[in-house]
Image (tube, rainbow, N blue to C red):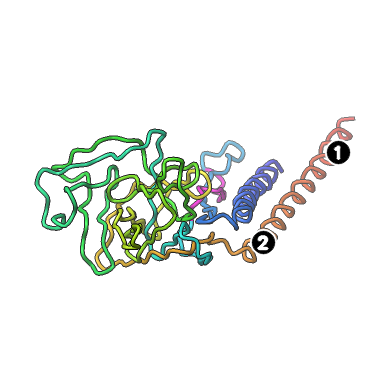
Amino acid sequence: MLRGFYNAAQGMIVKQRQIDTISNNITNSTTAGYRKDEAVLNTFKEMLGLVNNRRQTSGTFAQTYVDFNKTNLEQSNFNFTDSTFDIGLYGNVYFTIANDTIHGDPQVYQSTPTEDETDSPNNVVPPQIANVYQRSNGTVAYQAINASGYEVTENGGNLLTRNGQFELDGDGYLCLNAAGRVQGLGGDIYLGTDNFTVDEDGAIYTFDADNRPQYVDTLLLTYIPPEADVTKVGDNLYKYTGEETLPIGEGFTVIQGAYEMSNVDVNKEVTRLMAVQRLFEANSAVLKQLDTQNAKSASLIGLAKI
């Protein structure tokens, strides 16, 4: 009887966790760059108690629980707005946001550049990013940091995002609302104007009085494998501690005038929510039935003692 209480309650807990996860996905279905979460279930075998003081157990029983929530990183659709500040990414790369309160242009230097870095101006590499930036034509612009020979200047931690709804902060730097400044290969990206363009490789240009393009910087994009585990910070910011090197042949495209929407399919999530809710109610009904039976048993035991 008590075993039944335990199993029914455990089932309700698991389904409630799933309901919370699905509900959060539906709530953020309109959040730009949001990646849906999926509750990952696991089981463990619990030994049943001894029967009549026997030395051997009476068997095992599999228990199910929510192990963790995994973020689904699959590509989503774009919303085309024609706004110069809306930028989308196609591929497994993410914008880098400086998550610190003191903004600046932190520098990382290498005394002897490698052959792949000879085209980088002043051999300056962005801080705290261990990735190789690769253009769509296959050429490498910057070698990863944390390799031997680099001297890193600390300036807070960086966060990653697919939310490309950017704006200018009060000092004219490209930023993601209050999350922080967008990072380029040279650090914070100063624009000072809304008259700029971003090409498919992430290179940013402003225009002078004669409408001639002036190179500003290139977006610092960090690669995350589609099956990787990330840590969410808020709704659409992420931390990733795995390998960030862009694989050879892995391409991406930067799209200005559009931002990526969430990858939540509301119809599927609502259907899943209804199914999980029914299972929650079924476990609840079993628990109530067990409680009724337990009350009757207690009553019969009481009558037998009279």
In the orientation shown, which residue stands out farthest toward the front?
210
Query: As shown in the figure, which amino acid type bears the numbered disc 1?
Result: Leu
At x 50% / y 48%, what residue is drawn? 68
In the orientation shown, which residue stands out farthest toward the left?
112
Tell me: 169 left or right of 209: right
Pointers 1 and 2 in contact (CB under 8 A)? no
The residue lying toward the viewer, choosing from 63 and 77, is: 77
Residue 47 makes an appearance in the image: yes
Residue 214: name its quadrant: bottom left
Name the spot of residue 96 as percent of width and height, x first.
Answer: 37, 49
Residue 61 sits inside the magenta stretch? yes
At x 35% / y 63%, what residue is drawn? 211
Query: As shown in the figure, which amino acid type bears the numbered disc 2?
Result: Val
Residue 83 sits inside the magenta stretch? no
Badge 2, how many Cα within 10 Å: few under 14, some, many 20+?
A: some
Distance (Cα) linking label 1 and label 2:
45 Å
Q: Is residue 71 above or below residue 257?
A: above
The kind of secondary structure element at disc 2 is: helix
Residue numbers of the magenta segment: 57-71
Residue 35 makes an appearance in the image: no
Name the spot of residue 34 as percent of width and height, x first.
Answer: 52, 55
Q: Is residue 65 above or below residue 206?
A: above
Name the spot of residue 191 as percent of width and height, x first.
Answer: 38, 50
The kind of secondary structure element at disc 1 is: helix
- Disc assigned to residue 300: 1
Quarter in which the C terminus is drawn: top right
Quarter in which the N terminus is drawn: top right
- Quickly name the residue at label 2: 270
Of labels 1 and 2, earlier in sequence is 2
- Chief secondary structure of the magenta span? strand
Q: Is residue 218 above or below residue 250?
A: above
